[in-house]
Structure formats: C-alpha cells, structure tokens
Image (tube, rainbow, N blue to C red):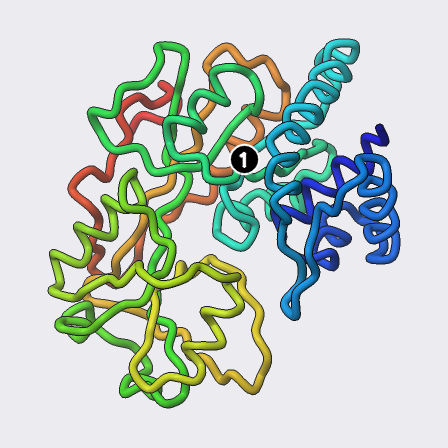
C-alpha cells in the first residue's frame, strides 16, 4: 500500500476538500486526486463521495479512516525510531483555523530552523490529547485546562494565550454596524454554534459565559463545513456566532460578514500548551520560550475569564 496515498486520504478526510488536502501536503490538487484514485483501486472500494462543497467519506471510507491513521502512526513511529532527536516537533493545534495554529505559524516564521509537524487530533478532547502527549504520539497540544483536572504526574502545562472573543454577524443583523459591543448587549440573544461539544473544557467555558451574560447558545442542527455556517450567517437577519480574535477564516466578499469586538469586559478563552516533562526534543523549550514572550496582558479593557482560568500544574519557569 502506498503510504503517501494513505496520508493523502487522511488529510482529505480531515479537510473535507481535495484542495485543502493539497495545501496541507504541499502538492497539487491533481496529485491528490491521482493518489486517492490509486488507493481506491488498491482497496477495491470508493472511499469518497463527491459533493458540491467538496468530498465526504463513504461508509467504506469511514471504516478505513481509523485504520489509516493507525497505519500512519506506525510508519511515523518506525521512522522516528531510527532517527532519534531528528524528527520534527509534532504539535496538535486542535484545528488549523484557530489561534493555536496561528501561534505555531508565527513561531515557525520567527525561528525557521526548527522543523514542525502540525497535526490535528480529530474529535480529541482534553483527556485524549493529554493521553497522546503522555504516550509520545505528539510532543505538545493546546487546550484549556480547568483547575482540579487530574493530570498524569509527567504532564506539565503553561499559559499560551488568552484569546479575546468577537461576535460574527452578517450585514442584515441588528448589530452589524456596531464598532464594538458589550457582553450585556448579547443578553436574550441566540448565539448559533452548531456542533459545539456538550461536555469538556470548551462546553464548560461557553456555558459559563452564556450564564454570566444571559444569552443562549444553540448548538443544534446539522453540522456541515464551517463555510456553510458562514454562508447562513451572511444571509440571516438574526443569526450570529462567537469567533476567536485569532481565528483565521476566509469568506467571499459578497458575504459582507462583520467581526465585532466585545469589550467592557472582553471575554477571553484561556489556552495552555501541554507537554510531557521529560520530553527531550530540542525545539520544545524553544516553543515554550516563544509563547512566554508573546503573552501580553490586556491593555485598557476589563477582561472576563471563566472561574477555572488558571492551569493546575505549570512548569516552574512559568510560575508567576
């Protein structure tokens, strides 16, 4: 089996588009199509169904995906086993459009001498991500860590960023022309966040935020690609969603979406970097030092943060 084809399949499955997979793998979209076609011929079934918005896994593709990931993990471990200390720093950014990915990209630009393997642990919650770090599958991950959350003795955390939130609305929304709003102006409104988890640190954050300022979060409805959510918001006169200030989403100019800062106070989501204390990778302390240098206190504005803001076990160098 062609491992490059398997890696291409996993990237296309996670991105939902051959074009995004091509960008992810730094190859052409035609090369992606050829690799997928060769893999489908090899296994004798169709792995993807083409849709107007991209591709989606067939039933056979869904069955093949977890085994494909395991196969790639085995290949990566075999490769790393004969090149100790030389492999790229493997960091889980959770999603490629959010602030953690942007922070890692900035680190790479400033310190290009360190090789990075940027990954996303699909549907992995905090505990699953910590287990991946503890088991050596990845070197680090980005998550919020509520105090009291039980961590293995080997795991360390440090604050990476406090990400401000913004309100994203379309041109027909009543708040579309606001230069900024307060959280109080969201009271009684419905914030649409389809697919938001019902448990875990993300759910806990938004539940506390909604309760603090009296708005409702609607996480129901079919979960399509993020682009479909943006399209619906652009057409609506009442739909809105919350978006991190560091999140990087693109949409057509015709959508005329507005990112409205939320101030007095500004809600911030606490993000920590999580790593194993005995991880010897030389790039890991460089990344932590870079993130420490990037942390800047909020200036000129009151900040709202969840009651569980601070991480439970920091590296001694990060204690404040």
Residue behind mark 1: 92
- Total tally of numbered discs in the picture: 1
In this rendering, would 46 be left or right of 228?
A: right
In this rendering, would 162 be left or right of 124?
A: left
In this rendering, would 135 be left or right of 148?
A: right
- Name the element at disc 1: strand
Residue at position x 75%, y 18% in the image = 86
- Nearer to me, 53 or 241: 53
Residue at position x 13%, y 73% in the image = 188
Residue at position x 37%, y 84% in the image = 236
Res 41 quadrant in image: top right
Report crowding for label 1: few under 14, some 14 to 19, many 20 or more residues within 10 A (C-alpha): many
Q: Where is residue 163 shown, x and y percent of the image?
A: 37, 52
**Where is the C terminus found, in terms of image quarters?**
top left
Q: Relative to 231, say whether 51 is above or below.
A: above
Residue at position x 59%, y 13% in the image = 280
Res 253 quadrant in image: bottom right
Res 138 quadrant in image: top right
Q: Where is residue 286 shown, x and y percent of the image?
A: 58, 28
- Nearer to me, 44 or 115: 44
Q: Where is residue 318 shown, x and y percent of the image?
A: 37, 27
In this rendering, would 247 be left or right of 14?
A: left
**Where is the N terminus found, in terms of image quarters?**
top right
Q: Where is residue 190 shown, x and y percent of the image?
A: 23, 71
Q: Relative to 161, say whether 91 is above or below.
A: above
- Nearer to me, 290 or 9: 9
């Amino acid at each position: 089996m062609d491992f490059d084809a398997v890696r291409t399949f996993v990237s296309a499955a996670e991105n939902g588009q051959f074009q995004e997979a091509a960008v992810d793998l730094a190859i052409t979209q035609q090369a992606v199509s050829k690799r997928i076609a060769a893999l489908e011929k090899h296994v004798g079934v169709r792995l993807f169904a083409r849709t107007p918005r991209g591709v989606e896994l067939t039933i056979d593709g869904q069955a093949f995906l977890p085994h494909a990931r395991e196969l790639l993990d085995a290949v990566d471990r075999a490769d790393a086993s004969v090149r100790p200390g030389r492999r790229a720093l493997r960091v889980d950014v959770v999603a490629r459009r959010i602030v953690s990915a942007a922070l890692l990209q900035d680190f790479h630009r400033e310190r290009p001498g360190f090789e990075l393997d940027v990954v996303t642990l699909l549907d992995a919650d905090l505990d699953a991500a910590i287990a991946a770090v503890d088991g050596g599958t990845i070197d680090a991950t980005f998550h919020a860590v509520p105090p009291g959350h039980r961590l293995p003795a080997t795991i360390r955390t440090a604050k990476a960023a406090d990400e401000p939130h913004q309100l994203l609305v379309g041109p027909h929304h009543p708040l579309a022309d606001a230069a900024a709003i307060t959280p109080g102006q969201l009271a009684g409104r419905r914030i649409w966040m389809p697919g938001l988890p019902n448990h875990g640190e993300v759910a806990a954050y938004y539940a506390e935020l909604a309760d603090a300022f009296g708005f409702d979060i609607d996480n129901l409805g079919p979960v399509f690609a993020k682009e479909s959510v943006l399209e619906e918001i652009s057409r609506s006169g009442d739909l809105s969603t919350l978006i991190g200030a560091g999140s990087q989403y693109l949409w057509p100019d015709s959508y005329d979406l507005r990112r409205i800062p939320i101030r007095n106070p500004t809600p911030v989501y606490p993000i920590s970097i999580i790593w194993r204390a005995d991880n010897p990778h030389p790039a890991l302390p460089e990344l932590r030092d870079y993130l420490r240098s990037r942390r800047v206190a909020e200036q000129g504005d009151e900040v709202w943060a969840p009651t569980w803001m601070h991480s439970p076990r920091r590296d001694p160098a990060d204690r404040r």
